[in-house]
Amino acid sequence: MLKADKVVVLRNSRGGHVRVVREVYLREQVSCFSSLCQDRCSNEGKVLPGDVTHYVVPDAGVVRDFLEVLEFRELRGIVFTQTACQVVQHTRGRRQYNRLRSLLKDPRHDCVLFCNEFQCYSYCPREKGETQEKWHTRCVYRAAVWYHDHLAGLKPVVMITEDQEAVAEYNRLTSGVYVISTQEYLQSFWPDLQAVQELYISIAQVLQERESEGQEREYAEHLPIEVLEAGIKSGRYIQGTLKVNKHRPQQEAFVQAISSTKSTELSSDVLVWGVRQRNRAVHGDSVVVELLRCGEWRGRIMALTEAEMGAEERIGEEQSQPMPTGKVVGILQRNWRDYVVTFPPWEEVQSQSRNSQRILVIPWDRRIPKIRISTQQAEALQDHRVIVRLDSWESTSLYPNGHCVRVLGKAGKLETEIQTILIENGIHVPAFSEAQLREMPLNSKDNPWTVEASEVAARQDLRATHLVFSIDPQGCEDVDDALSVRMLPGGNRLELGVHIADVTHFVRPGSLTDLEALSRATTYYLADRRYDMLPAVLSADLCSLLGNVDRYAMSVLWELDAKSLSICKVWFGRTLIRSSYQLCYELAQNLLNDEPVEVPELTQVEEVEREKRLKELKTALQQLTQVARHLRTQRDRGGALELEGVEVRAQLDADKNITALVPKQPLEIHETVAECMIYANHWVAHKIQESFPQQALLRHHPPPRQEQFAQLIESAKARGFDIDTRSNKALADSLDRAVDPRDSLINRLLRMMATQAMSNAQYFSTGSCPLEQYYHYGLALNHYTHFTSPIRRYADIIVHRLLTAAIKLDGGLGPNESVATSKELEEIAQQINNKNRAAQQAQKQSTELFQCLYFKDKDPLTDQRCVAEAIIYAIRANGILVFIPRYGVKGAVYLKNRENQVVSVRSDGSCEWQGGMLQRHPDRICTVTPSGTHTFSLFQHITVRISVQALRCHADTLCLEVTSNRPHETVEQESLTAGKGRTELVQEVVRWAEEASQQAEEHDRMPKLSKEEREYQQSKGPNLYCLLQEIRELALLDLSACQGSETCITSA
Amino acid sequence: MAGLELLSDQGYRLDGRKPSELRKIQARMGVFAQADGSAYIEQGNTKALAVVYGPHEVRGSRNKTLHDRAVINCQYSMATFSTAERKRRPHGDRKSSEMSLHLKQTFEAAILTQLYPRSQIDIYVKILQSDGGNYSACVNAATLAVIDAGIPMRDYVCACSAGFVEDTPLVDLCHAEESGSGTALALALLPRGGQIALLQMDARLHQDHLDPLMEAAMTACRSLGQVLDGVVRQHLQEVSVLTGE
């Protein structure tokens, strides 16, 4: 039955010495996970490849301190021993251990775990008087020897250690097993990997310095964990996540209490004032705070901060009433990530510190304190952006300690800045690896991809029966949806079909592509480029529903009553389609309007045939429009909000080179396609929720809190509009009414404020949420999910899998691919939500970057393009917030400068600084100067001058200055330049950057990088989707609060 | 080292066993001459001693007597030195009395009590070293002792504990696994007929998981039965050599 030896291990644990006897069972068969295994080990899962030159076994100390070095994918063939893993678990805590575990699970990384302590030949008991470190080293060495013998000496095994004595002791003991120090190993085996060696050196330096730390105490010690837990339970302390105020990182931080603290009736966040009371907590950490006495409470500052331009103030009470204030007494969980920092100029370093190897670097993110790192490259790295990781923050040190990980490049270069944005948002998009591309089906000229016979049999074949067409923006390559509509025989049923690319046929669960797609979660659209979620062979070819080729699809077919358009039957299933027409929006709209058009697919066809087929297509489009109108009215009756309309309009204008200032009706066909997609999403959500009530991935949009609408209602009142926010229907209706015929921008601004008041839509698993919370507020639907864009959203892939499983369940078959449990699904949903937020943030920041680059080399005093019209949309204590429609920029304008001067207006409208004071009213702000009183009121049009404030360590910001309180007058010139549109702004900046980089030949990394990116970019130049995204961004909507608009963009 | 990892990603338990593997078992019968039957068992580091007296007349109060079958009297105790920290009270505490009751129920189901009306059978079990699975060690030791005493039983009674960690049933839990979070269940089985003599579980478990957990425990009990059977046969052989048969 069981052949095991019993060995007794003695251990002491806890305060009192307790002798615990544990047994260990040893066995001969322990899997080695090497493909070279001679002994037929049962190696399931990941195995080490045979094509590496050697295997490396790191010592326990190396794994403990230098795990980051071992995380490099270039280091292949690593064998982690159980001994080392246990050391990590015991000394570095769970977080580090989980990191090691996920590393071991990651199929992209060639490393395995060998359970050496359960192997009877590699096990060694601790000897009397032997120190723990020595014992661990001996265990690891025995494991290395066993590994070498087990593979019959086919591979040399290298053990790396930090212990020089061990090197001397073991190196010559067994031939084929080499023991060397880590540094020597990296130098001799991986001389090309400069980054690894630098990382190693920087960590080693940090370790060295930690030993020689000073003892002066700067901060109070954190309380021990037991005290914290007891305090939280008793309600004395409050637990929460620390959020540092971006605009006042030195002073203000807030802790949002988590709900478990019942005893304290805190309605608001807890303020933590100043660095000392923050007590070494960093933005994002999970902390425990203790409230101060009421007398010591203080309020937040309400004024716009002068020092940081472009800062937008949070909306709050009129005065800064004292709010609960506390101090951090302990940290439950550090939440440190990689930070991008900038090295100070070399002269500054030399002047400020005695020890020029320890440098204070400034993080790009203002919320992060300065980080002290020790490096010898400070001179070479001045003005470079570098990735840094935090190591520790002792109470004796004013700043946290960190170490360099990777150099990004010189600050201010386009490539560096884009990389910075990606890293700061936690977006990791390396090129697709070879192993991932190997999983992809082939489709080349000589070896074209064809439909498999078995799939044809299993799928519904719609190629002959249905007229399928897709409507997309001009030049779109990743077509993930197509439509069909036809009258069923008999004439009283209409069949509407939505066909979505069947991505899950190609992306199997658990495959490398799947894992990569999950970790990306979405395709990232930046202002000038994009990073795809799936490799190009899928996204632009095999999954794209191109015209006149056979493609797999997931289809939803509705049978509608031809008269009343009510639903009779719904069918879901996998299909085989061949799209007949690949239309673009404008073409489809022209067809609908019965205007003469040229359909590219029909140019080769004879006259008579062409007429016939054109008629057929027109009928289909008309039917489609009719159905969509019906669906839209149904949804409107439910209270769907239209917040996105404005943005789409703006985009279209840009696309058609019409000034973006004049809102124009969007093409109806946009709405038609969007409506069909929303409908499909809705029905699929309904279906999967019904089949898997506990584990379906849906998307909900929680109703906003009423108090969030306060600003909207106030502002609308200033113009005499009444906004009713009691329900989504009331809100939609009152927004529709709030139109000023003289100034169409007001409606846009009001809609923007409404959107800002709302929370984000989120993915969730039905098992984790009560039924009432499934509701989608923006779309007014009780179930909603994402189904229609699997090429660029991971959520859709999950939903496709669920739908497939649901169909199988209906057919009486058990789902053969097991459906993810609710808990797993919730984790996936969380990951996708986080990545979506990061994607939006990155996009916003990249757009801001381009705005700054655009204005950077223009002289604000002379260049006409730097003067633009702006509209006031909010009033603050010392300034106003304005929106510039022409560039889509939002920003703050200060009416009071540092010398306490205020803006005064001359009789011709132009402005100058004069001594005076400000008076603030709810709907206007007045400047009182010797020359008179001047009023700036809400929704007033003024003229501002745009300039760029260049910052060395952070992102550049735009700086606005009021030049006149009248609308900008040079209309002709404006329409001329605006005609260029946003697209060209982006292209122009890209071109400059490329020219500059070509001239600067010494910087050879950048062109290479951008070439790579272009390779993975599917369509050249910005397509409509990114433009939509971009314009939406520019045109008012703050993306972090914007949800409604993405549904419309679904159709793109 | 908060939260020990009870089951590693590679499927090893803390002590190097796979989920369905038992600990090493060693047993001897007839360790004391004065008692009618006695046995000693080691399951891993859990060590138990069982002694059986009887059947004999009912001692003490006569009103306990049953007219159609024998009374079974069980007493469970733990040696003061059996745990890592010295135990104050070796028997009579709540846990011990509960355990005594469970043992009694188990053996009433297994011994053919109707053969001995108006008599009493005493089973005394002592845990010498405790490392998880005390109940099962007691039951297994007592079975051997009852057999040693020559009292007829329906079948061996084999007991085994099982726990549920990370969606995997673990059998024959050691102390660390028992005290870690997770559900534990104790099962006493008559292996030949597959009847359950006792099933005890006092933590929460999802209904869907009960069947696999029971199945794992029953498989473990069956293999335990084989081990016990081997012990009995060897003992008989030794005894018959001594008696010269």
Image (cartoon, rainbow, N blue to C red):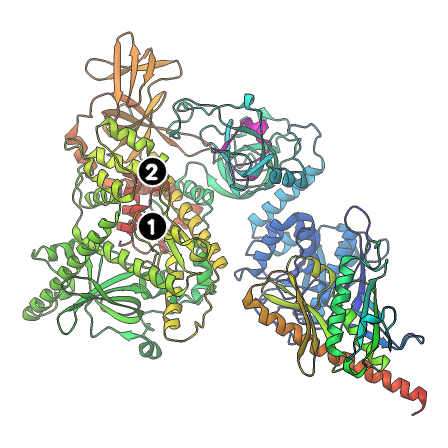
Q: In this view, does A426 lie above or below B16?
A: above
- Above-or-below relation of A182 to A990: below
Looking at the picture, how far across and down is residue B179, in whole percent? 70, 58
Q: Residue A372 sits in which quadrant? A: top right
Q: Is residue A288 left or right of residue A526?
A: right
Three-letter residue code for mark 2: Gln
Q: Residue A756 carries which label?
A: 2
From this viewpoint, which residue is outermost toward the left?
A608
In the displayed structure image, the side of residue A328 where residue A614 appears, left or right: left
- The chain letter under disc 2 is A
Q: Give the range drawn in magenta.
A: A268-286
- Under tag 2, what secondary structure? helix
List x then y, in percent, for residue A1005.
Answer: 44, 47
Q: Quadrant of residue A84?
A: bottom right
> Which label sits on residue A776?
1
Report whether A120 appears left or right of A655. Answer: right
User: Residue drawn 58% across and 71% down?
Assistant: B211
Q: Which of marks 2 and 1 is in front?
A: 1
- Local packing at callout 2 (Cα closer than 10 Å; few below 14, some 14-19, many 20+) is many
Whether labels 2 and 1 share one chain: yes
Which amino acid type corresponds to the residue marked 1 in the rendered image?
A: His
The CA span between labels 2 and 1 is: 17 Å
Residue B57 image offset from top left, x and y in percent: 87, 76
Residue at (23% x, 54% y) in the render:
A473
Mark positioned earlier in the residue sequence (2 or 1): 2
- Quick one: SS at disc 1? loop
